[in-house]
Image: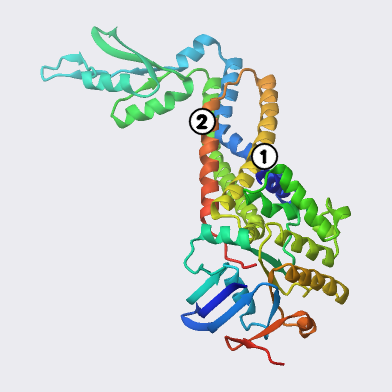
């Protein structure tokens, strides 16, 4: 099922009165039950593309569709609601709140979801913590966890509101091989559960986990035949 | 939502350090606001040690003696203040009563106008106002002791006025810098909330709740310390009344303006 679509997408920046083209004529669909990997050199625009899909940035020209709906012209409140309902983010540096426990970090997205009250929020959080095998660490702070554990907390947080789209920017960039495998096992199980997983990476080592690899080169996106 | 954000914010050591600096600044700000008032009360108490009530009363008196003039026929006659001048004096700030009297000397009846000000410390102000209107005034000088005392008071008061504004400006600047740093400390966490789907209005609410919590805690500690200092002052020097409403109003206005400026003046953008 098609989840995300970009049609004739362009992205440019103006810096010191000079136009810099980051993305050119992007036409791509992303479907559920697949792991997509967007590869390319550093500075190719991979994170920019991910941010555009996640509505954290916007196209200069073209349209972005999520679940068949054109979200290009949404206002900030509507974009925030969309992110809350449909998109989960995972970052290379985890971006956990250093001063919140594992439990509090995972609960953060649930406060803005009207579906949950105090009791169900706690239940959902406990379920997510169990899913990533961190029940005995739920009162710990990020500084007391390993890199792999922190990324598992970040994944649990990303899944809090049951999004259909998972966007991961170099999710294993700061992890060793063992933890990398664990993280991608989790991403694979998300794919198998009907999520659309889009991973940005410049590491060749993780390509084997992808169903489809897309290469971003000179602003253009194409399927990596290699 | 707010509870967990505030808890996290207070766990940050650097925010706790800012609370300490803020409560110290709160104390300095309030000392600055009340500095001249404290000095006035101190000198009131000291004056009572060297002068009795009658002398203090006399120190509040101002006299105007327009004197006498000689007309075309060479006859000396008394000069007097016009009605307008008399009304101006009565309306002058701090003047509380006004009497017109006469005094005879060498066959000439002179007009003398006497009035009191509410506080011996306001004599100088009223004299200046009347001097500018071209009205010569005389005051009771008192003994040498009292004259030295008064001179000393006006010097110290003048200096304190300058110090007061220096303290107020410095504390406002420091408080502003601290709020900017507090906002900067929150930046990454607030950006993350946007990624998680928090709406701009919700993020603003969290930002202000954090800042107001820190302000409230620093005020609470500051008020406790000020009350202790106040009680020490009162024990040593006697009765002291402070215009609490005025103090609170000034603090609220000052902090509100600083907070507003600190949130409006944007930091450099940083991306996640």
Where A204 sits versus A167, above or below?
A: below
Q: Are both tags, 2 and 1, on one chain? A: yes
Residue A209 is situated, as x and y percent measured from the top left of the image, at 78, 79
Q: Residue B148: tell me if it is visible.
A: no
Q: Is residue B76 left or right of residue B27?
A: left
Label 2 crowding class (10 Å Cα cut-off): few <14, some 14-19, many 20+? Answer: some
Q: Residue at x 72, y 46 (%)?
A: A120
Identify the element where label 2 is drawn.
Answer: helix
Residue A13 is situated, as x and y percent measured from the top left of the image, at 51, 78
Identify the element where label 1 is drawn.
Answer: helix
Name the outermost residue toward the left. B73
Residue A94's quadrant in the figure?
Answer: bottom right
Q: Earlier in the sequence, mark 2 or mark 1?
A: 2
Where B6 sits versus B187, above or below?
A: above
Residue A177's quadrant in the figure?
Answer: bottom right
Residue B188 is situated, as x and y percent measured from the top left of the image, at 66, 60
Q: Which numbered tag is attached to residue B218?
A: 1
**Which residue bears the numbered disc 2?**
B154
Which quarter of the image is occupied by the C terminus of chain A?
bottom right
Where B266 sits versus A19, above or below?
A: above
Nearer to us in this view, B43 or A98: A98
Q: Residue at x 80, y 83 (%)?
A: A205
User: Does the residue at mark 2 contact the one at mark 1 (Cβ under 8 Å)?
Assistant: no
Q: Which numbered tag is attached to residue A116?
A: none
Question: What is the number of callouts on the image?
Answer: 2
Q: Residue at x 24, y 9 (%)?
A: B109
Q: Residue at x 70, y 76 (%)?
A: A34
Which quarter of the image is occupied by the N terminus of chain A?
bottom right
């Amino acid at each position: 099922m098609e989840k995300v679509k970009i049609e004739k997408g362009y992205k440019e920046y103006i810096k010191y009165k000079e136009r810099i083209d980051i993305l050119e004529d992007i036409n791509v669909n992303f479907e559920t039950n697949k792991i997509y990997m967007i590869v390319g050199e550093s500075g190719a625009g991979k994170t920019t593309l991910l941010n555009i899909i996640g509505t954290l940035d916007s196209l200069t020209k073209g349209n972005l569709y999520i679940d068949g709906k054109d979200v290009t012209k949404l206002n900030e409140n509507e974009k925030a609601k969309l992110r809350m309902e449909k998109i989960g983010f995972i970052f290379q540096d985890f971006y956990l709140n250093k001063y919140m426990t594992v439990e509090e970090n995972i609960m953060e997205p649930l406060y803005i979801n009207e579906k949950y009250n105090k009791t169900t929020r706690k239940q959902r959080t406990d379920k997510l913590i169990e899913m990533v095998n961190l029940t005995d660490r739920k009162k710990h702070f990020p500084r007391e966890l390993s890199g792999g554990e922190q990324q598992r907390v970040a994944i649990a947080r990303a899944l809090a509101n049951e999004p259909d789209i998972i966007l991961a920017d170099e999710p294993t960039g700061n992890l060793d091989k063992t933890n990398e495998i664990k993280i991608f096992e989790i991403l694979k199980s998300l794919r198998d559960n009907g999520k659309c997983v889009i991973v940005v990476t410049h590491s060749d080592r993780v390509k084997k986990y992808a169903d489809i690899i897309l290469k971003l080169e000179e602003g253009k996106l194409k399927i990596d035949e290699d | 939502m707010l509870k967990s954000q505030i808890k996290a914010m207070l766990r940050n050591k650097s925010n706790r350090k800012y609370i300490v600096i803020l409560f110290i600044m709160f104390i300095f700000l309030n000392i600055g606001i009340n500095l001249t008032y404290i000095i006035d009360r101190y000198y009131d108490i000291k004056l009572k040690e060297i002068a009795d009530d009658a002398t203090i009363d006399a120190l509040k008196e101002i006299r105007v003696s327009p004197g006498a003039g000689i007309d075309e026929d060479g006859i000396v006659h008394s000069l007097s203040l016009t009605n307008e001048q008399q009304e101006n004096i009565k309306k002058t700030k701090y003047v509380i009563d006004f009497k017109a009297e006469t005094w005879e000397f060498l066959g000439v009846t002179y007009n003398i106008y006497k009035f009191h000000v509410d506080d011996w410390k306001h004599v100088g102000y009223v004299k200046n106002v009347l001097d500018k209107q071209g009205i010569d005034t005389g005051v009771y000088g008192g003994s040498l002791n009292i004259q030295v005392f008064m001179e000393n008071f006006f010097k110290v008061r003048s200096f304190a006025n300058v110090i007061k504004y220096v303290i107020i400006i410095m504390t406002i600047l420091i408080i502003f810098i601290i709020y900017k740093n507090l906002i900067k400390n929150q930046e990454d966490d607030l950006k993350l909330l946007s990624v998680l789907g928090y709406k701009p209005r919700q993020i603003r609410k969290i930002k202000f709740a954090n800042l107001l919590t820190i302000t409230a805690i620093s005020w609470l500690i500051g008020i406790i310390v000020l009350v202790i200092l106040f009680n020490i002052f009162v024990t040593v020097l006697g009765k002291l009344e402070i215009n609490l409403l005025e103090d609170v109003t000034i603090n609220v206005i000052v902090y509100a303006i600083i907070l507003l400026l600190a949130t409006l003046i944007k930091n450099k953008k940083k991306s996640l």
